[in-house]
Image (cartoon, rainbow, N blue to C red):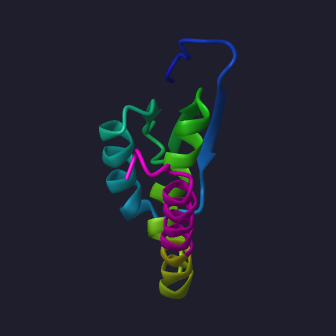
Amino acid sequence: MYESTSPDVFKSQVAKIKRGDRWTVYRRLQELNIPCWCPPDGTLWIEVDHCIHAILLRSTIQQFVGTRSELIDWLERCWSFNSEQFTVNSSQLTTKDK
C-alpha cells in the first residue's frame, strides 16, 4: 500500500465511482499532481494534503457521479460568481485605472 509523505494528510477511498471510471479518475488526479493509488483490489485511494486538492478532487469526481442538471447548475453558479466578481472589481477601479 502507498505510504504517506506526511502524517497530517487525509486519506480516503473513493467508493462512488464505477470501477471502469476509476482509472480515468486516477489518471486525471495524477495529471493534477494529487497523490492517489489503486491497489490490486481495484479500489481508488486518494491523499488530500491541501485544500486545493480537496476542491480538485470534488470537481473531478463530480464529473463522473453528477447528473447533467447538477453539472449545468454547478457551471452556471461558477459563471454567476465570476461575473459578480468582475462587476465588483470593475466598479472599484478609479478613473486613473480605467
**Outermost residue toward the bottom?**
69
Q: What is the x, y in percent for residue 38?
A: 43, 39
**Outermost residue toward the front?**
95
Region in magenta: 77-98
Q: What is the x, y in percent for residue 71?
A: 50, 77
Residue at 58%, 60% in the rendered image? 88
84 part of magenta stretch: yes
Residue at 32%, 55% in the rendered image? 24
Vertical position of residue 78 compared to residue 29: above or below? below
Depth check, front residue: 83 or 58: 83
Q: What is the x, y in percent for residue 28?
A: 33, 48
15 part of magenta stretch: no
Depth check, front residue: 85 or 70: 85
Residue at 65%, 23% in the rendered image? 9
Vertical position of residue 28 compared to residue 7: above or below? below
Quadrant of res 22? bottom left
Q: Is residue 28 left or right of residue 80?
A: left
Helix, strand or loop: magenta stretch: helix
Q: Is residue 61 left or right of residue 48?
A: left
- Mark count: 0
Residue at 41%, 45% in the rendered image? 96
Vertical position of residue 43 compared to residue 7: above or below? below
